[in-house]
Amino acid sequence: AEILHNLGYEVVGSDQKEGLNVIRLKKLGIKIKIGHSASNIQGSSLVVYSSAIKKQNIEIKEALKIKVPLISRAEMLAELMRMKKTITVAGSHGKTTTISIISEIFVKSELDPTVVNGGIINSLGSNTRLGLSDWMIVETDESDGSFVKLPSFCGLITSIDDEHIDFYNNMRNLENAFEQYINNISVFGFSVICSDDDRLYKIATQQNRSDQFFYGTNARANYKAKNIRINKQGQTFDIEIKNKNEKRKLYKNIQFPMHGRHNLLNALGAITISHRAGVSFKFIRQALRDFEGVKRRMTLLKTSDKRQYFDDYAHHPTEIKASLRALRHLSGKRIITVVQPHRFSRIKQTFDKFSKSFENSDFVIILPVYSAGEKKIKNINASCLAKSIQKNSKTKTLAFNDFKKVEDYLNDEVKKGESVIFMGAGNISDLA
């Protein structure tokens, strides 16, 4: 919406609620209605819908009835990408942060990219940027399988995990989609793959492609992080580069102000794809050192009387574990985690893993499941999850049925020096 607006098109839209993105787009002059209605699309020459919108949606039905062309967000993105030299980032976790770091590197090196990201890049104050160069950097969406169709000059895969199995039905179908994505990369470009992910490494090496570069912390990596040092300010590491027919190189003391091994890997992926695209390590160093982070990726909202309050997008068990592990390195005192589980189908699919994700939290508060439009599933609720987490993560866990009760409870409960982290992909930021 923002890029089309910046290109001079008249853009209007609708959403179920007024979130931060809606407020930001309204400030740009884009008219957005709250609530979906057939009247919202009157006068439109094209309707674009996201993968979260079901075919039964009233605006979709109206578009079909009055014969207004309908295309998905991914198809619109493909149209915008067609004339550009595109870097796409795919994977179950870490896409938004990785894209943000690549964007920072390209902006620092004055390559003036267009950027379409899944989250707000703090340095831009937006999830998009309209650049004048041939480069375009895009976060893909594998939730509906559309990412395999995007025209990619270069591609990066961060990880493969049991995300969006409701769409793919099983892991093999998901793996097949990532194989398609790899083989859709331009023969003039290259792909960048995380070698620390065993499943992903196996899939990548089975493809008949020689244009692959691996990054990670193990011996399989062409771009390997070594000598990793962690402190309150973030992490510092060295990078060893080993490629066929190239002299081995070592770049020392790269500073990066984010915590967690998952963020180290995100940074490594961004470094690898930028360096292979021709960016000098001088600009890579600067961009990583000055990186301001991504909204809702362990964002420190406030420190009050030595109490720290964080807001985090983590909602899949792998993401929850990674964020809590990173926070444990920062905090010597008690960590209180407030979680809004996301989608009944996802919680059912990952129930056991989810229940075992909180070992690094000293106390967990579970909110009602954010449905994202799904129907309730029997025994998938806050109280069942709380019991299972207390048993499997061996940490005190309580279930609450609304935000106000949590707010009142935390105001009495949180002591000096303790950390509270709010987690989820729904509207938990309002509480945070």
Image: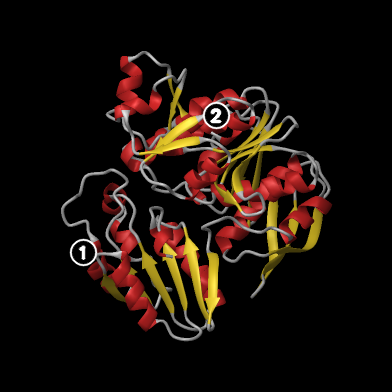
Disc 2 target residue? 77
Residue labelled with disc 1: 384
Residue 421 rendering spot, x and y as whole percentages: 45, 69
Position of 254 relative to 88 (above/below): below
Q: Residue at x 74, y 41 (%)?
A: 276
Which of discs 2 and 1 lies nearer the camera? The answer is 2
Residue closest to the eye, 55 or 181: 55
Q: Specify the quadrant of the image occupied by residue 355.
A: bottom left
Residue 181: percent from the left, percent from the top? 53, 32
Q: In the figure, is residue 241 to the left or right of 86? A: right
Q: Identity of the amino acid at label 2?
A: Leu
Q: Position of residue 323 (x, y in %)?
A: 49, 64
Q: Determine whether the residue tagged by mark 2 lies in a helix, strand or loop.
A: helix
Instruction: Name the amino acid, label 1.
Output: Cys
Name the residue: 39% across, 48% down.
162
Question: First in sequence: mark 2 or mark 1?
Answer: 2
Disc 1 element = helix
